[in-house]
Image: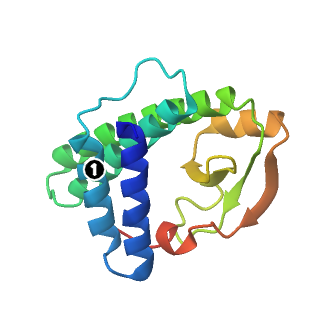
Amino acid sequence: MNAIQKYFQYKQSLIDQYVKGDMTKNEYLERNLDAVLSLGIKPFKNIDTVEKGLFNYQYYNAMAKDYQMRMAAYADNELQAEMRDESNFFYYKKDKSTLAVLNMLNYQNISAYFIKVRSKYLKGRLFEVVLYEYEMILHSKSGVILRNLRREGVFIEAVKPSLIDGYINQRY
C-alpha cells in the first residue's frame, strides 16, 4: 500500500469517527490536515493519475479550510484578509485538481448537482461532484468546472441534499 492509499484509508477512519459523533467537525478537519501534512508528500505537479489528483484535492482543501478556521481567530482586518487570500488560493488549486481528475475520467461515471445549504452565501453556488468509481465526493463553486460539467451533460439541474449533508451544513 502506497502513501496515498494509506492516507485515504486513514481519512475514511476519520470520516467514520466523525459520523459516529466521536469527533467534532473542527477535530475532523484538524486531524485530516495533520494526516495530509504528515505524509511528507507535497502536492503533485504532474497529475498523471486520478489518485494523485484526488490527493491534491484533499491537500488543497485541507489547507484552505485551515486558513478559513484560523481567519476567525484574528480581529485585525488586514490579517483576516491575508488568511482569506491564502484560503482562496488553496481553493483555486483544489479546483485545478478537480478539473484534472474530471478530464482524466473523461466526465464518465460521475454526476453533479447544486446542493441544499444553510449558508446564504453558498446557496446556488456550491455543487457536489460524485465520482462513483472512486466513491469520492468533491465540492466546488467554480464557474469553469460548472460549465464543463454542463457541457459534458453530467450536471443535473436540480438542488439536492448533499450525500454528506450533516457535514456540509455544520459550521466550523
Q: In this view, does 106 lie above or below 87?
A: above
- Work out which residue is located at the far right of the displayed protein and give it: 153
Q: Where is residue 131 in the image (x, y as percent from the top left)?
A: 66, 47
Quarter-of-image position of residue 93:
top left
Q: Where is residue 62 in the image (x, y as percent from the top left)?
A: 35, 48
Quarter-of-image position of residue 11:
bottom left
Q: Quadrant of the C terminus?
A: bottom left
* Residue 155 located left or right of residue 66: right
* Residue 71 located left or right of residue 56: left
* Residue 87 located left or right of residue 15: left
Residue located at (73% from left, 33% from top): 148
Residue located at (77% from left, 44% from top): 109
Q: Which colour scheme is used?
A: rainbow
Q: Is residue 125 above or below residue 23?
A: above
* Residue 32 located left or right of residue 55: left
Q: Quadrant of the N terminus?
A: top left
Q: Where is residue 164 in the image (x, y as percent from the top left)?
A: 56, 68
Q: Is residue 10 above or below residue 155?
A: below
Residue located at (21% from left, 55% from top): 70
| Label 1 SS | helix
Q: Which amino acid does label 1 sit on?
A: Ala
- Work out which residue is located at the far front of the displayed protein and give it: 1
According to the image, label 1 marks what residue? 35
In the foreground, 125 or 105: 105
In the foreground, 165 or 77: 165
